[in-house]
Image (cartoon, rainbow, N blue to C red):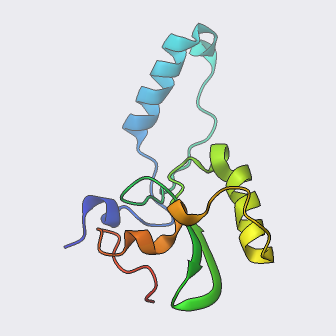
Amino acid sequence: APTPMEAMRILDPTPDPRQIAETHARAQRLLPGLKSVPVAARWAGYIDSTPDGVPAIGELAGLPGFILAAGFSGHGFGIGPGAGHMIADIVTGAKPIVDPRPYRPERLEGSAFGKVAEF
């Protein structure tokens, strides 16, 4: 049976009004100036994640030339520029700005993530 995480991995999930209200209330407590500011829009999405919380970045053995970059789990804003530079280095054959070995997708084989090279 699918795990709760798998069941929620849909591209257009419905925003949770209770979570929005709680987050809005916390923001108002932290920043009292927000007490008169309503929530203008609501959106929900899914978070891609790997079992170890580290993105999977690298060429897939089963698809030569295909570079996977996934599983940033919301950290893409912070590490995206460096990851993008490293990916560009991998694609162009330049010496990577960072050692790419800790990010290789095949490290996840045998984990809850399963086989990453098979489609």
61 vs 5, left or right, is right
Residue at screen point 43% across, 79% down? 116
Q: Residue furthest top?
A: 32
Outermost residue toward the left? 1
Q: Is residue 33 left or right of residue 19?
A: right
- Towards the viewer: 48 or 43: 48
Give the residue displayed 55% in from the left and 65% down from the top.
101
111 vs 22, left or right, is left
Instruction: Answer yes or no: is residue 84 visible.
Output: yes
Relative image position of residue 81 (x, y in whole percent): 74, 51
> Which quadrant does the C terminus fall into?
bottom left
- Classify residue 94 as left or right of residue 87: right
Question: Which of the 4 quarters of the picture holds residue 8?
Answer: bottom left
From the viewer's side, name the closer residue of 81 and 24. Answer: 81
The image quarter containing residue 59 is bottom right
Q: Residue at x 40, y 36 (%)?
A: 19
| Image position of 11 with respect to 115: above or below | above
Return the x and y of residue 87 as percentages of the image width and height. Answer: 71, 66
The N terminus lies in which quarter of the figure?
A: bottom left
